[in-house]
Image (cartoon, rainbow, N blue to C red):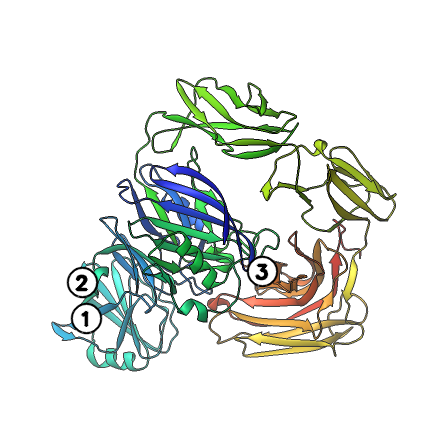
Amino acid sequence: MSFKDFRQQIAPGVRQWSRQIICHSGKQQIQIIEVQPGQKQLFFEAGLTSKKVIGMEKTTEQAAAVCQTGHRVIAAVNADFYNMVNGLPLNLMIHQGQLLTAPNHKTAIGFKDSGKAIIGIPELSVKVKINHHVYTDPCTVTVNKDRREDQLLLYTENFAERTGTDDDGIEGLIEMDEGKAQSGCSVKGTVLKLVEGKGNNPIKKGQIVFSGSGMAAKWLRQNVKVGDQVECSFVLAGEWADVTEAVGGNRLLVDNGLICENTEAAGDTIAPRTAVGIKQDGSIFLVVVDGRQPGYSEGVTIKELAELMVKLGVEKALNFDGGGSSTMLVRQPGDLRATIVNRPSDGAEREVANSLLLISKEEEGPLSQLVIRPQHLFILAGSKHTFMAKGIDASYQPHPIEEEITWSVEGNIGEITGQGQLIAGSEPGEGFISAASAGVTGRTGKIKVVNQLTELAFPQPEITIDHGMVYQLDVLAFYKGKKVNFDPACLEWKFAGTVGKIDPSGIFTAFAQSGQGTVTVSYGQVSASLKVEVGKEPFLLEDFENGIDNWEIKGDRCTAINLAVATSPTDPVRFGHHALRIDYNFLNQKGISGVYAFPKQMVALEGYPNKIAMWVYGDGQGHWLRAQLRDGKDQAFAIDYTDNKQGVDWKGWQYVEAKLPKGRPLPLKMEIPFRYLATNDERKTTGTIYIDQIRAVYGETKYSE
């Protein structure tokens, strides 16, 4: 592996690294947080969803919920794998000493009040006592999990408002008299009620619930009755006994400084990844590798992730949930809240079950220094860039600047105005920007002016623009792999064609006529080209007028599915004589149910559409409507016609569009135009959906009726 670094201090004893990695899987972008040992003002804690075990929230929301004076989130990453239906973490979770979920025999990370962190496989034993009689192992006993056959569950008030179980079992509602669910402790209570044949019972404040099915239900039936005194004690074995904060992962990546053998068996799938590692001296590393973004960051295999952690010098490392879940937050110096520093592969932040938060308990102090943003910059000769200064205290927390800021330049990089705008010189050079106010100062890292580029690149190879549209073209500039800030007017812009014009700042104006041309941008000997098409009409991908012999249907966790051709006037048809009918039945299914309709051969798309669109005859059931495409590197990616929460909430015909992300390599292919997903176990329904006129939409062109 080879590396290119950017580093900054974000709190005393805490550094953020931004790294560009070149490895076997290609170019990668990673974010790293390094926490040095002995930082008494810092500690880690588990981030929860709405203070409960069950549920999903974005990592930013989990962090914001606990951010307050004396308890500021400095950094955070997503943590455990989870049930994507209800948001239940799969492994151990401990918060403020409370046992929130039991371990699942996989690797987790724990933190003690002393600040020591451990990575290993925690083991929990639960002892049950009824009326002072000890049942060491009535059956498999666990805490705050999805109930399984023959398993005795103990649900605490931290779990959710209700148990979420089905009707096949027994649940005992217990009023807590004393105690807490914590290693080395016990809870005691009195059985208020036994409920048989009715699941999903409420978990009220101050109560716990015994829940069992199969052999566990039989044990409850034989041994527990109303009025009984119940005691449950909890012990985490070995060094886990005094852990006060913990979150789980699934796989040990590094042990004793060596890559674990099981990483090889994890396969060669490349994806975004999240990991945590501990060095021998107690330093802790949080790592996020972006992925599924060709040209920016490809993603890594599990083994490559382990290699990276070894490169950082860790003794032990743990793999957290990855893919679209991979998220890192950092509180930039001078900011109050932590914000996302990586690029989640879904194009937006995903809701997750829990997170790992780095907390500072420092109170706000007096103004200590100024921090200038950006800290590092490559800028093209003759370009301008405005810097910003913020006040911080000794712990890097924000403090208002009440007096005027004085700006200055060191080195041969140009001039700076009183408003902090750098006007880069015409020759290459290196230097620094400084700011001063109220007797305190701040200084950037190295600022470099370059008068040559090694690469220019458009985000995608072609675009479509509507008639009369005025559009600022985006282009990226690089010098030896480093992104360069520039004024568009410093580049040379040309357009070959008669359908529009381009000005010296890269602003394209489309004319009234349709057609195509090529924009070329250059600087010195480096150039890039972009195909521009004006007024391209939507392209019909499928109208079902020739039947559905080349279409298939599949499903996950379905009771029944069916694909049929819809014919007017008997069936709803939006245009012509035919549409596609999809019948589904998700009743009595657990987990994410889905029905998928797709052509037997993927459909190649012309150019680079902005959107995929179609007409949908909704059934009002509120399920999630998506599609799946593949890019020129055969990487699958999803697009959304609706969001996951609102879904198809209409009845009758409605026109829907799903935006395509920018920058995917061509050619693009439509793989699954219709993906209908029921993600909530409490909303499993049966119904019928019709679709008609699937189209690729270019520019901002709307569907014409």
Amino acid, disc 3? Gly
Relative placement, left or right, of 489 versus 219 is right
Q: Taking the image as drawn, is residue 510 in sight?
A: no
**Whole-percent x and y of residue 26?**
57, 56
- Depth order, front residue of 270/172: 270
Labels 1 and 2: the sequence-earlier one: 1
Disc 2 from disc 3: Cα separation: 44 Å
- Residue 186 is marked as 2
The relative height of residue 109 versus residue 5 in the rendered view (above or below) is below
Question: What residue is disc 3 on?
Answer: 647
Which tag is nearer the camera, tag 3 or tag 1? 1
Q: Residue at x 29, y 79 (%)?
A: 217
548 and 446: which is toward the camera: 446
User: Which type of secondary structure does the marked residue at label 1 adopt?
Assistant: strand
Cα–Cα span, label 1 and label 2: 9 Å
Q: Earlier in the sequence, mark 2 or mark 3?
A: 2
- Give how far apart the Cα atoms at labels 3 and 1 are: 45 Å
- Residue mark closest to the camera, 2 vs 3: 2
Residue that protrudes farthest toward the left in the picture: 132
> Is residue 74 shown left or right of residue 37?
right
For disc 1, the marked residue is: 127
Q: Residues within 10 Å of mark 1 (few under 14, many from 20)?
A: some
Q: Residue at x 55, y 34 (%)?
A: 377
- Are the two marked residues, 1 and 2, in contact with CB atoms closer than 8 angstroms? yes
